[in-house]
Image: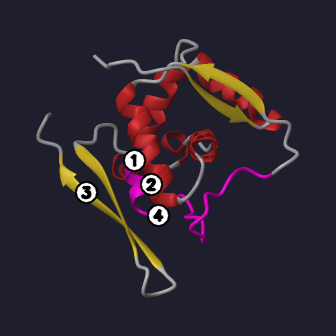
Amino acid sequence: MYEPCTRSTLLIPARHMSLFLEKLKEHNWSVSLYLAHLLRRYRFLIQNGCLEKHEFLKTGYQRKHQGLMRVDFVPFAEDWAELKCLRVFLNRSMTWIFVSLLLLDSLDLEKNLPEKYVEFVVPKISHVRLMVNVTLSRKKFLYARVLSMTRDRAG
């Protein structure tokens, strides 16, 4: 199904650890499966600006003094690559993105939205390939991030 990649690490704030473990239990205690679920489930919202871009070119990390707890796992290569693309596009750390998706998942949109909106807002299957292009300009004091989507022909 998926090709695994090397061992990776996420840093979860201590106050969100019980939520993380609760969600992990729903996914057979597999961080890799849960990450895949988060990216698949909320891809549409991410692409439509649900996660805030960091305003500076420098990467934005989680706030300090949160008692970050280390979680080691082996992600699926495709999911880790997508998270890296989101890191570049949002100028946010991959852990910041993961924790933001965890908090979004805690809202249980499927249960709390009217049924007719659930499939539109939280699509279950997406055949869209995420592509990130970063354009930097030496002539001006600005940079642009462009998120372009193409239909995934691989199925």
- Image position of 93 with respect to 23: above or below: below
- Image position of 2 with respect to 136: above or below: above
Q: Give the residue type that dot 2 points to.
A: Ile
**Gap between marks 3 and 2 measured at Cα:** 12 Å
Q: Which residue is mark 4?
A: 49
Looking at the rendered structure, the secondary structure element under dot 3 is: strand
Label 3 environment density (alpha carbons within 10 Å; few <14, some 14–19, many ≥20): few
Which label is found at residue 149?
A: 3
Q: Which residue is mark 1?
A: 43
Left or right: 106, with 28 as reference point: right
Label 2 environment density (alpha carbons within 10 Å; few <14, some 14–19, many ≥20): some
Q: Which residue is mark 2?
A: 46
The disc, 4 or 1, on the residue closer to the chain's N-terminal end is 1
Residue 79 appearing in the image: yes
Q: Are marks 4 and 1 in contact (CB under 8 Å)?
A: no
Q: Give the residue type that dot 1 points to.
A: Arg
The disc, 3 or 2, on the residue closer to the chain's N-terminal end is 2
Q: Position of residue 129 (x, y in %)?
A: 25, 46
